[in-house]
Image (cartoon, helix red, strand yellow):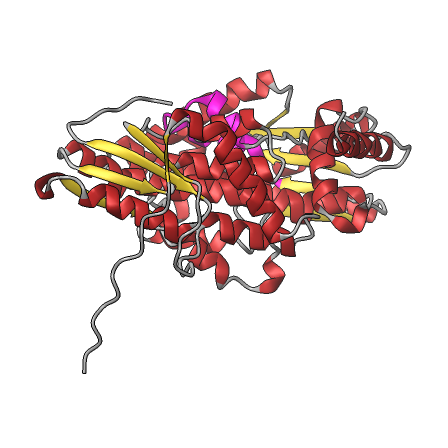
Amino acid sequence: MTRTRGRGSLIAVDGVDGAAVHAVAKAEIKAIARARRGGVSVWDASGIFGELVVAADDAGRPSARTLLLLYAADLAFRLRWEIKPAVEKGHTVAAAPYVATAIAFGRAAGLPGGWLNSLFAFAMQPDAARVVDKASPRKAKKVCFVDFGCTHLSANGHGLTRHQLAARARAHLTRFALPQSSRTAAAPPPPPRARRR
Amino acid sequence: MTRSAAAYRNLRHRARRHFTAARRGLLIAFEGPDGSGKTTQRKLFKTWLQSQGHSVVTTKWNSSELIKPIIKSRKTVQSLSPEEFSLLHAADFRHRVEQTVLPALWSGNIVIADRFLFTGLARDVARGLDLDWVLKLYQPLLWPDLVFYFAVTPDTSSRRITASRTPNFYESGRDVTALDDPVESYYTFIKRVIKEYESLAIIFNMLTIDAEQPIGEQHHRLRALFRDGQTRPWSEWNVDAVAEWLALDRRHR
């Protein structure tokens, strides 16, 4: 990976539970001085996957490789428009998810590690990495890349269920990405908002 | 060996056995810069093949029903970086290989590809990306049985394209040339693309057609090259691409 360090920094937050990953990313950014907060860069900022959802059924379902090429295209978009400009201005950005989640999904789907590493060679090296290995205590409301991919693959006759694929991806993240990062349990849920009367 | 590794080895064996059979599908790619007359020749060639009793399936560059609309909308707003351009076209290619090319080859058809992965390689490298990285995007590689390369000079390509229309933003490479004039940008960009194509034609042993020659002569040369080349042995390099597709597609398990 190319190391492109600006004045700010990039925190990669990875995991298979979308809501938990987002909560941790938000907490990371909140812990930074307000002037240096660059925000959270989330999956599908480019809208590619939103367009896939509305594609005609007879267009054919994407395979794991196709989904990962699309994820990489979306990440290139996020790097260009969200992450690099903020980092160059001296801000801290949390990318949730980043590369490790996609690699874990690819490994769960049986794709070779060499291909996956090469695919994401364009991505800048994060300054810090967090792996969220616990589920959100709240009922997850955010569909994440792993959910999306596992749902597509299981419907495509991959041979494994959505839960089995997600469990494989989680196991891969825990085994390979955790040693290089700091393990982070899901952030506690925010206090319930006071109801308007 | 794990169960999945044994299953994958079995799929590789099936792929090899199927494609080394006496009668198999053939993959023929038509490559070359814009304005080289590929599409004209592809149509003539298809008609001739059908007249010879072959069943022919055609696939065109950037035509997957799933990915094409995504690329089109981003081209319209000129929002693609070279990496995004490359990755989206690789996704479109992979989807067509899985949905169109391999099913047709498995059923014994001749597949004519109007542009194949070499188009991606030539254009992406001309945009400044690393050849090795781009080539890996297209893995597992599916090599055509025959690749016809339609060679023209940058002057001919530029003259033919600009005779009837103005090249669009990405076609003229304005995203990387920093030139405002589409015609000038096209000429600059197509020179780079042709240089890459010429290297690829040597590396990948393409069959070069002089696309400056009359249409009829080119067509007869294609027929002769096809007759000589159709008995080429199946490329062992393709076994991973076919095995991965068999693993995807339950119908063939």
The image position of residue A18, as x and y in percent, is: 41, 51
The vertical placement of A156 against A178, above or below, is below
| Secondary structure mainly formed by the magenta segment | helix
The percent coordinates of residue B43 (x first, y second) are 66, 47
The answer to whether A180 is drawn above or below residue A63 in the figure is above
Q: Position of residue B68 (x, y in %)?
A: 49, 52
Q: Name the residue: 85% across, 47% down.
A: B53
Quick one: which residue is furthest to the left in this view? A35
Residue A82 or B107: which is nearer the viewer?
A82
Q: Is residue B150 visible?
A: yes
Task: Please tell me which residue is depicted at 23% across the width and 39% down the height of the picture.
Answer: A93
Q: Which residues are magenta?
A: B114-137
Measuring 13% from the left and 33% from the top, which residue is drawn there?
A: A90
In this view, the residue in front, A194 or A71, is A194
Left or right? Give the position of B231 relative to A44: right
Q: Using residue A16 as the reference point, say whether residue A44 is left or right of it.
A: left
Q: Nearer the viewer, residue A161 or A4?
A: A161
Quarter of the image containing the C terminus of chain B?
Answer: top right
For residue A39, what is the image quadrant? top left
Residue B208 part of the magenta-drawn span: no
**Residue at position x 44%, y 52% from top?**
A144
